[in-house]
Image (spheres, grey):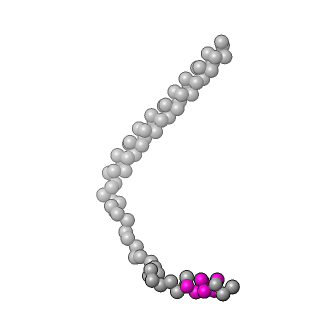
Amino acid sequence: MDMIGQGLVLMLFGMGIVYLFLGILIVVTRVSCSWIARFDSILPAEPSKKPAAKTKAAGDDADVALAIAVAMNR
């Protein structure tokens, strides 16, 4: 029975440490969130949009047609 008592004490101590850590984590997260909100006016609301890279038109399938033709001739 002595080992069961020690196991229960160890379990309660370990769970207490976990809950304490989670409580501290929640407090730190809320404090940092309110602290970062002060500097929200400095940061841009939306990221700047970069010019779109050139993309192939949907009807420009010359490369695909060439690959198919080469594959068919083999």
33 falls in the magenta region: no
Question: Could you tell me which residue is drawn at 33 percent across and 61 percent down?
Answer: 45
Question: Could you tell me which residue is drawn at 42 percent across and 43 percent down?
Answer: 29
- Asked if 1 appears above or below 42 in the picture, the reply is above
- Asked if 12 appears above or below 46 in the picture, the reply is above
Front residue of 46/43: it is 46
Magenta segment, prevailing SS (helix, strand or loop): helix
Quarter holding the C terminus is: bottom right
- Asked if 8 appears above or below 24 in the picture, the reply is above
Question: Could you tell me which residue is drawn at 40 percent across and 73 percent down?
Answer: 50
Residue 40 position by quadrant:
bottom left
- Asked if 71 appears above or below 34 in the picture, the reply is below
Front residue of 15/74: it is 74
67 falls in the magenta region: yes
Quarter holding the N terminus is: top right
Which residues fall within the magenta stretch?
Answer: 65-71
Residue 54 visible in this rendered orientation of the protein: no
Residue 69 is situated, as x and y percent measured from the top left of the image, at 60, 86
Q: Residue furthest left?
A: 41
Say how many tags the image has. Answer: 0
Front residue of 21/65: it is 65
Residue 43 is situated, as x and y percent measured from the top left of the image, at 35, 60
Question: Could you tell me which residue is drawn at 48 percent across and 35 percent down?
Answer: 22
Residue 31 visible in this rendered orientation of the protein: yes
